[in-house]
Image (cartoon, helix red, strand yellow):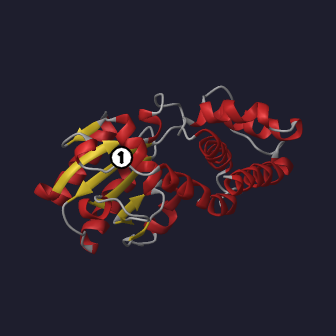
Amino acid sequence: MGQIDDVLRLLHGTFGADLVGAYEHGSAVLGGLKPHSDVDVLAVVRRPTAEAERRALVKGLLPVSGGGPRPVELTVVVETAVRPWRYPPVREFQYGEWLRDEYERGAVPAPEPSPDLAPLITMALDGDAPLFGPPPSRVFDAVPHADVVRAIVGSVPGLLGELDGDARNVVLTLARVWATAATGEIMPKDAAAAWALPRLPAEHRPVLARARAVYLGEQDERWDDLRPGLRPHAEFVASEIDRMSHSR
């Protein structure tokens, strides 16, 4: 709980009585943390954030995330931006390790529409794991399934653009998008990979099998031997997601 305690202290110190609640999502509520899982926290505040507050969050999270045992992902929303639900809601703030270079150069995230909040809030509701504040069902409306699917399918072009720098996460996330689009269930990444593997042509299975094994801590991470197959694998899965979304 050390990193979560650090995140909660930072949130309380930044927002005080304006912090409504903080909720786990992601791997922690989808079958448990794995060796390469992030600490995922969704915070809800009563009012829009100030730039100085967002800067303070970045400053506080850089050492907590970079110096701790796990990367931290923190998302902040204003309660009136997500309840009543509308698509896409506005996200006030996001910190993730994939953004570290920008933040170390002094960038401060600004509020912006975020379709990704649809699956994130769904996971927080399903997980029902408040770290602070009331149960998530008292803070969030249920997200229509169509909005969850629209959001995750819409994330595919961005994922493809991140493949070269974040192969494991992109490959596993694409498997999760595919599985969710097909089944309606948001699965843990390893479970989504297990669902997708038998549905892949044989030539595309080694990439996903490697990503899953690394995620579970069964293999060391390396892609030099499979790099020629990374892009063909990702594009095949993306084409299956596109085909499925147009067949509905």
Q: Quadrant of residue 201?
A: top right
- 203 left or right of 59 in image: right
Q: Residue at x 75, y 54 (%)?
A: 243
- 104 left or right of 169 in image: left
Q: Residue at x 65, y 25 (%)?
A: 218
- The three-letter amino acid code for the residue at tag 1 is Val
The answer to which of 102 and 139 lies nearer the viewer is 139
Instruction: Give the residue at mark 1.
Output: 41
Please identify the quadrant where the N terminus is shown: top left
Q: Position of residue 48 (x, y in %)?
A: 24, 69
* Within-10-Å neighbours for mark 1: few <14, some 14–19, many 20+: many
The answer to which of 23 and 181 lies nearer the viewer is 181
Q: Position of residue 106 (x, y in %)?
A: 41, 72
Residue that protrudes farthest toward the right in the picture: 203
Residue that protrudes farthest toward the front in the picture: 248
Q: In this view, does 81 lie above or below 133?
A: below
Q: Position of residue 200 (x, y in %)?
A: 80, 38
The answer to which of 28 and 52 lies nearer the viewer is 28
Q: Which residue is drawn at 43% across and 64% down?
A: 87
- 58 left or right of 105 in image: left
Q: Is residue 158 above or below residue 167?
A: below
Q: Is mark 1 on a helix, strand or loop?
A: strand
Q: Which residue is drawn at 71% across and 36% down?
A: 196
Residue that protrudes farthest toward the top in the picture: 218
